[in-house]
Every structure is written in C-alpha cells, then in structure tokens.
Image: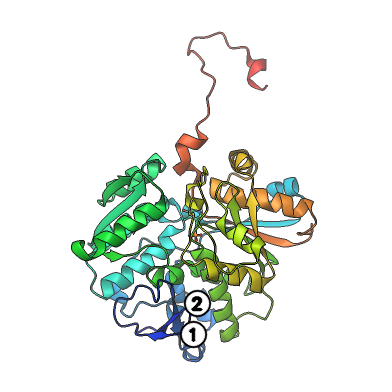
Amino acid sequence: MPSFVTHLEAAIDGTRLAHDQLQTTHQGRPLWVRYDLDAVAAAVTPADVAARPPTLWRYRELLPVERDDNVVTLGEGMSPLLPCPRLGAALGLERLWIKDESQLPTGSFKSRGLCMAVSRAKELGARRLAIPTAGNAGGALAAYAARAGLASFVFMPADTPVVNRIEAALYGAKVFLIDGLITDCGQVVQRGTEPMGWFDVSTLKEPYRIEGKKTMGLELAEQLGWRLPDAIFYPTGGGTGLIGMWKAFAELGHLGWIDAQRPRMFACQSDGCAPIVRAFEAGARFAEPFPDPHTAASGLRVPKAVGDFMILDAVRESGGRALAAPEASLLDWTRRACALEGVALCPEAAACVAALADAVASGEITADAEVVVFNTGAAQKYVEALDVPLPRLGKDDDIDWASLAD
Ligand SMILES: *Cc1c(COP(=O)(O)O)cnc(C)c1O
C-alpha cells in the first residue's frame, strides 16, 4: 500500500520539501509530514481500523511508509489505557487514566518514534544510523536497526542509567559514552555525519519520529471511543510526543473522526531541567538552554529542544501550561504510583503526577476532570535511582512474624 504523504513542510516557515528522499531539518528546525487527508478519509473508516491487529500500524493510512516490506516492527503500539482509581483518589481525581507505554518494545515509547524513523531511513536507502540519547532512544534505535539489518551508532552521557547502556550494546549498536550532556552527544553525531556516512535520527532532526509518536494520540482517541479527555499530562524532554499528539488530533479532526473538543496539554518537566517551563512563563516562543540540568528522570534531561516552539505553540493553543515538578518529589511519586496501581511508573511520568497533584491542589484541574497521564517508560530501567535496601532473613532464623507487618 502506498502512503498518502504529499510533502514535507518546514515548521518554521512553511517551505515545502520532497518526501521521496532523506531529509533532515530546514534552517536547523524540524519538518512536518503532510498527508492528503481527504484521500485518507475516503480510503479508511474507524470500523476498518478497529478490525486490524493491535499495533500502531493499524493507522497505516496516516503513516509515512510507502511499501509494506519496509515496515520494521517489533509489534509496537496499542499500549493499554488503564483506569487508576487509587492513584486518582490520592490526587483528588475521579477519572484518572494512565496510558502505559512501559509495555512497548524496549520498555519505553521511544519504540514508536524509532520504528517509524528506521522504517523510512531503510526505505530511502540509509545504511548507518546515529543518535544522541538521554537513555531510552538509544536502546530503541539499536533494537530497530538490528531488526532492519542496519548499523547503529549510539552516543550517551556517561552517567546514563546502566540499563540503557547495556540494552543498546546488547542489540548490537556501537555505543559510546560522552563526558557531557545529550546536547554534547548531539554535537558529536553532527560532526561525524559526513565522515562516517551516518544518517542522524536525533529527536526532530528527521521528520518521521513525530509520526510514530503521534500514534499515542490516535490510540488514545480510539480507546476512548473517538473522543478525547479534558487534560493530558505529558513528560516533556524533546517534546516529540506532545507535538505528535497535537498533530494527531488535528488530523483526526480533519478526517471527521473526532469533534472539535481538544484536551488541555500540560508539558511537565522537573525543576532540575525546565527550559520549556521557563519559556512558557516568560511568554517566549523559543527556549533558552537550561544551565546545569540535573534530574533522575533522564528522559527529561534535555536542556535545549530543537522543537521548543512547536511544543510551546501546542501547549498554548490547547489552553494548557508547562509545569515544573520538584525534582526532590520524583522518586517518592514513582514509588507511590507503582505501589498504588501496579503500574511500572518511570520518574519522567512521576513528574507528571507531581505536577498534576499541584494542579489539583490549586484548582487548575477540577476533581471531575478526565485526565490522562503518559507513563512513557518502565520503572525497571532506573535501577540505580530506585534501588531500595531490603530486610534480610536467615533461612533458619526464628522469625518474629508480627514484626514483618510493620
Ligand atoms: C525520551 C523520554 C521522554 C521525553 O520524550 P519527548 O517526547 O522527547 O519529550 C519522556 N519519558 C521517557 C521515559 C523518555 O525516554
């Protein structure tokens, strides 16, 4: 099945670019993928989609891959939308959902963006893919590159969580640790692109990761019966997911599959790295680099996002806000949410829960609002941050049973 893509469009000034060749950015800023949505509306209905297998490829007409045999997949997508009444009650909310992305291949939603980027890179002839990563993107690239039979090169800060380091190497990537931040890793990739013949699949430096991540918005709408919640709390690093979902809602609106109601979008960060929050509060369209960023939520350790204006535009259009959660509260909220709901909530999503707690307390979010939090990754990937000392029992000890319950 051919795609319905018509062209690529520069987000900064609307310049049209061809979609039948590898593209990166325009004036250093990201590209949108545009479709013939009238033709999509004529070709497929929600009932057709409902009859397809439960992966993100069920939205094939809204995705950019031209030929089915170029689809690189590990069965990603259709993550569960879980009602969370106990966590909701703890926050003072009657209708709280978690969209649980921890169950996707490689344990994070990065698989959505990278299955799409790798499929298109393969389709357009790239053979060696390189990426700077704060953690989860490196593992996802490595897995999909392996699946596609392509070479991958992964650059991560030396203090990236150990599971991220191991998984990328395990999937056969060449992995390098850099003494610096993700932005420094990005510089190395940029410098190496020409001499090494790499295609750079950095966040928003190629057009297709957004298309993969927009499927979170498509799934959410379908799972709610083709309607949307009142508010979405999304942990924002590079912002691809938030930007992608906002695009998904616009496309679904054009198709007539949803009405005009849109959720308020809340971009959540840690106060240890909150460039988007600062820009939002300053009323700026672009964000300044955040100095000396530090957070246990490694996916949020992005001091400068190339798509900053796209995030801020979406948040403002939606009537939402950018919110900073106290860094000191993230691991507590991680543990609380995991224990209350049995969901492997990552520290990034805990930033959403912490910000949501404040928003409920201040009255910005009312008790009857329907709220969706995105759990973008699996708690298990953060073993160093979440390790806990456990009591030891000798196998032959006399055990004081009553004391075990304390
Ligand atoms: C990458 C990442 C994020 C940030 O995602 P963006 O869409 O780039 O803002 C959030 N959470 C986790 C677990 C991540 O790996």
Q: Please indicate whether residue 39 sits to the left or right of residue 277 in the image.
A: left
Disc 2, SS? helix
Measuring from the top left, give residue 144's x and y in whole percent.
32, 60
Question: Measuring 27% from the left and 70% from the top, which residue is drawn there?
Answer: 122
Measuring from the top left, give residue 171's x and y in whole percent.
28, 51
Measuring from the top left, give residue 238's x and y in whole percent.
48, 60
Disc 1, SS? loop
Instruction: Point out which mark residue 352 bears.
Output: none
**Badge 1 is on which residue?**
44
- Image quarter in which the C terminus is found: top right
Instruction: Point out which mark residue 49 bears.
Output: 2
Nearer to us in this view, 264 or 252: 264
The number of discs equals: 2
Question: Measuring 47% from the left and 84% from the top, which residue is drawn there?
Answer: 14
Q: Name which residue type carries label 1.
A: Val
Question: Measuring 58% from the left and 79% from the top, which residue is drawn there?
Answer: 250
Measure the C-alpha gap from mark 2 to mark 1: 7 Å
Q: Name which residue type carries label 2.
A: Val
Q: Please indicate whether residue 215 sits to the left or right of residue 331 in the image.
A: left
Q: Label 2 crowding class (10 Å Cα cut-off): few <14, some 14-19, many 20+?
A: some
Asked whether the beta carbons under mark 2 and mark 1 sit within 8 Å of each other, the answer is yes
Residue 133 visible from this viewpoint: no
